[in-house]
Amino acid sequence: MSKKSVSPAKPGNQPQPDSRRQRLREEQQRVQRERRVRTILMSVAGLAVVGTVIWAVFALVGSVPATPSAGSVDESTVVIGKADAKVRVDVFQDFMCPYCGQFERANGADLKSMIDAGTVRLVIHPMSFLDEQSGTARYSTRSANALFAVYKAEPDKALAFNAALYENQPEEGTPGPSDDQLKALATGVGVSQAVADSFTAMANESAVVQATQSAFAAGVNSTPTVKINGEKFAGNPTQAGALKAAVEAAAK
């Protein structure tokens, strides 16, 4: 049997070292390019997700109405005095509260004089948590509604009407003044008959509810609660002169 000859391989048929290194470099460059592309795509996708989340957060925040905190000036407060007064006094009150009546009698004149002097900006928060003390008459709500009506229509009469309501404050457990009696108290301090007649429409009942709920949410748990420039008054609110002294100290 004859032997089959095998031709030796030509040098050009075998990969050369330089050629192998070149292909290796090209493969490494291809892998690096693919990695960069994947990284860019992942970054873009991540930014898209973050952008979506941010948009969703802003959309959620924008869809939730801001709840005014107790002490803010909004439709559930009666604000009397200059906006640039040195001292802001917040009073959380209920017209059925006997201690609120004592507060008014001890401090009403002082507050008026400091308001007139431009020292105090008074912010009244009329609450109605003592409605049950007047049975079905709901005196706390009706009187607070009346104060809002006067404030919105004839704001210069609001402080006098507030004082008149306390001067004629009913005892707890009684129905309190009737609607006609509230109207008479209002016209007695100069409120027009048209505004007084609007009391029975109860157009401001929602403001009374808001004032009460906002106060509770802010931690107000008794009346009168008095704040001076946002800080709770630590003195005796029914002691004549105590509030005035604290306001004067805050005004310095």
Image (cartoon, rainbow, N blue to C red):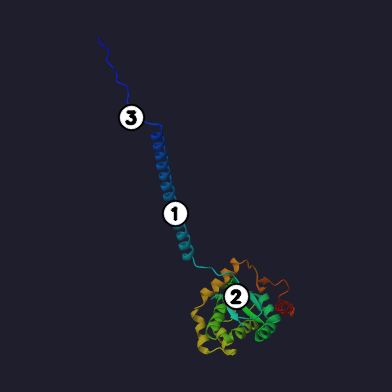
Residue 159 in the image, given as x and y percentages of width and height: 61, 84
Mark in the foreground, 1 or 2 = 1
Is 242 displayed left or right of 85 in the figure? right
| Quadrant of the image containing the C terminus | bottom right
Q: Can residue 224 be seen here?
A: no
- Crowding at dot 2, Cα within 10 Å, few <14 / some 14-19 / many 20+, comes out as many
Residue at image position (41%, 42%) is 29
Q: Which of 250 and 165 is in front in this view?
A: 250
Mark in the foreground, 3 or 2 = 3
Residue 78 in the image, given as x and y percentages of width and height: 58, 79
Disc 3 residue type (three-letter): Gly
The part of the image, by quadrant, that contains residue 156 is bottom right
Where disc 1 sits, the SS reads helix
Residue 67 in the image, given as x and y percentages of width and height: 54, 68
Disc 1 residue type (three-letter): Val
Disc 2 residue type (three-letter): His
Q: Nearer the viewer, residue 203 or 230?
A: 230
Residue 125 - label: 2
Where disc 3 sits, the SS reads helix
Is 45 displayed left or right of 141 in the figure? left
Q: Dot 3 corresponds to which residue? A: 12
Residue 55 in the image, given as x and y percentages of width and height: 45, 60
Q: Dot 1 corresponds to which residue? A: 49
Residue at image position (71%, 76%) is 250
The single residue placed furthest to the front in the displayed view is: 11
Among the two numbered marks 1 and 2 on one chain, the one whose residue lies closer to the N terminus: 1
The part of the image, by quadrant, that contains residue 87 is bottom right
